[in-house]
Amino acid sequence: MSVLSEKLGWNRARLKLMARLMRSLPIQTTTNLAQLAQVMKPQVNTDSTYRRLQRFFAGFAFGYEELGKFLLELVPTDPPYVVVIDRTEWHFGQTAVNVLMIGVAYEGIAFPIAWTTLDHGGGSGADEHTEVLEQFLRVVQPDQIRALVADREFTGSDFLEVLKERKVPFMIRLKSDRRVGPASENWSLPARMFARTCGLQQSSLLGGRQVVGGAETTEVRIGLKRLEDGPFLILASRGVDPESMFELYRQRWDIETLFAALKSRGFGLEATHLTEPDRIRKLLGVLALTYSWTLTSGLDRKRREGPPRECANGYPEKSLFRYGLDRLRELLVNWYQMREELNRCVQALIAPRLFLSCS
């Protein structure tokens, strides 16, 4: 708890509850508050703990900028960062729960830094993209970003203009019917028309600066590739080395791996009964910190014990996140026998670089 107090500066009662949540989440692997209440404080009536959790998410005001800075300290790499942004959605009954998140890509998975929750289902727009970007830029400066990588949902002309104004280098996938044309000319064609010249698995760059329909004041470079299963991969970039476009774009999948860890392959985010956007945002704050601790523990375990066992298909049996989750669960359940090792793992929250370098 002293670590959280130093980093976040919240009052003691809130910090104690946060620390207990971070202990309970790896054990229960669910965000269902009723199930978390069962293990948070055994000497207290479960119903009382449950009501306290409800009050925590209903009334406590998070400091998201301070939390974002703390989360950035847990990222075990130096800038410039490859930044990934995406949206995930699920339903509780008829109610849509919609989350927009930005994280830092690292070795196949992302560390969450900033997020917002939407008050509607379906796609997000430029205003919402700009809101979460501004949250992120209060923690990370534009010159610390190698590239912001995003999928086709983030190609709105207004958002591209914001990225240009904030001097954020970006690389975003375009829809194949988005019109593209030379910046110096007054004509454009659907992007797929340029991509048709590529052979299977071949890539090319359009010569010179281009503009995309609706964002004619934002000049970009266009990369084209025909994928193995037939569709085109069309990327618009600004401030990014054109030769590294396709290599960097692969890291967009890192945020999908993060979402899987928060949901079905980790903490069971979709099991929560919370639906009010502000409460979901607070829950994500607790999850983001617990997730970063878990992933750092997985990296530590890899360095100390070697990587997870490989399956017959050549892929690891477990992700590094799951590797760390299994270790933390073992330590937290058997803390009375493994207290020294658990205390060592808590050091990951105090000085993560030193923790990993000493592993």
Image (cartoon, rainbow, N blue to C red):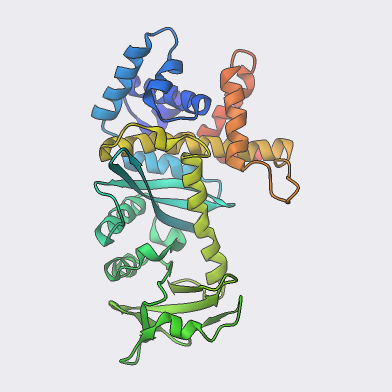
Question: Looking at this view, is 269 or 127 the one in front?
Answer: 269
The quarter of the picture where residue 49 lies is top left
- Quadrant placement of the N terminus: top left
The residue at the far right in this view is 312
The quarter of the picture where residue 238 lies is bottom left
Compared to residue 352, the image places residue 142 above or below, namely below
Compared to residue 163, the image places residue 66 above or below, namely above
The quarter of the picture where residue 281 lies is top left
Asked if residue 359 shows in the view, the reply is no
Residue at 52% across / 49% down in the picture? 257
Residue 286 position, x and y percent, is 40, 33
Residue 301 position, x and y percent, is 66, 36
Asked if residue 153 shows in the view, the reply is yes
- Quadrant placement of the C terminus: top right
Question: Looking at this view, is 337 or 231 the one in front?
Answer: 231
Question: Looking at this view, is 67 or 120 the one in front?
Answer: 120
Compared to residue 7, the image places residue 315 above or below, namely below
Residue at 45% across / 87% down in the picture? 208
Residue 258 position, x and y percent, is 49, 46
Residue at 45% across / 10% down in the picture? 42
Taking the image as shown, residue 194 lies to the left or right of residue 160, namely: right
Residue 100 position, x and y percent, is 35, 50
Question: Looking at this view, is 41 or 176 the one in front?
Answer: 176
Residue at 41% across / 72% down in the picture? 174
